[in-house]
Image (spheres, rainbow, N blue to C red):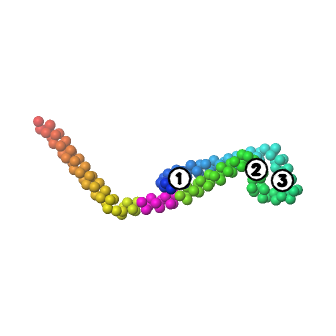
């Protein structure tokens, strides 16, 4: 919704979308932890990891930069990392759009309060209609009261 081709979203819609992205972020973070736990608890991955590290060190490759880039991670962990990064990016977009949406809503509210003769004409027409409704309700109430007193007298 935040990136919907120029169509502005309400703050409420953005908050709902942001909440969904936050849930996705939490789920992806949980997946990362779960995948890391699986890899740490799986001894077969340790030996392949240590063999890879030994080979990299003996070949003069900087192992620390390779680890940081995810070279030793498994498929599930890498996928969870990508999901996390995507969810964070989406969440950031929505969080950036919320203040813009709030500002637009404030401008619209101020514009409708002070804006134009059309808005003032609409407001005065609404007031006239409300007064008329109130008068009609009073007449109806008076008729009902008269009818009930007429029945009592008879």
Please tell me which residue is depicted at 55% across the width and 59% down the height of the picture.
96
In contact (CB < 8 Å): disc 1 and disc 3:
no
Decide which of 42, 109 is in the foreground and name it.
109
Which residue lies under the disc numbered 2? Answer: 73
Using the image, determine if residue 37 lies above or below residue 68: above
Density class for disc 2 (Cα within 10 Å; few <14, some 14-19, many ≥20) is: some
Disc number for residue 88: none
Q: Secondary structure at mark 3?
A: helix
Extent of the magenta region: 98-108
Decide which of 122, 20 is in the foreground and name it.
122
Quarter occupied by the C terminus: top left
Q: Is residue 95 left or right of residue 59?
A: left
Q: Position of residue 27 (x, y in %)?
A: 63, 47
Which residue lies under the disc numbered 1? Answer: 4
Please tell me which residue is depicted at 59% across the width and 57% down the height of the picture.
92
Q: Is residue 124 left or right of residue 144?
A: right
Between disc 2 and disc 1, whose residue precedes? 1
Q: Position of residue 31 (x, y in %)?
A: 67, 47
Q: Give the CA separation, mark 3 to mark 2.
A: 12 Å
Which residue lies under the disc numbered 3? Answer: 53
Q: Is residue 126 left or right of residue 145?
A: right
Q: Please, which residue is most extreme toward the bottom here? A: 114
Decide which of 116, 113 is in the foreground and name it.
116
Between disc 3 and disc 2, whose residue precedes? 3
13 in magenta: no
Between disc 1 and disc 3, whose residue precedes? 1
Q: Please, which residue is most extreme toward the top here? A: 154
Determine the main secondary structure of the stretch shown in magenta: helix
């Amino acid at each position: 919704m935040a990136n919907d081709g120029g169509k502005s979203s309400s703050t409420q819609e953005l908050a709902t979308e942001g909440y969904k992205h936050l849930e996705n972020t939490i789920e992806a973070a949980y997946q990362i932890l779960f995948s890391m736990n699986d890899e740490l608890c799986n001894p077969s991955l340790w030996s392949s990891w240590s063999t890879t590290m030994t080979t990299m060190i003996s070949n003069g490759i900087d192992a620390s930069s390779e680890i940081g880039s995810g070279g030793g991670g498994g498929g599930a962990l890498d996928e969870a990392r990508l999901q996390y990064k995507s969810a964070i990016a989406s969440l950031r977009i929505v969080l950036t759009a919320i203040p813009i949406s709030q500002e637009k809503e404030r401008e619209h509210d101020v514009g409708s309060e002070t804006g134009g003769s059309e808005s003032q004409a609409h407001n005065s027409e609404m007031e006239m209609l409300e007064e008329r409704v109130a008068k009609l309700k009073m007449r109806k109430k008076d008729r009902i009261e008269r009818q009930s007193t007429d029945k009592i007298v008879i």
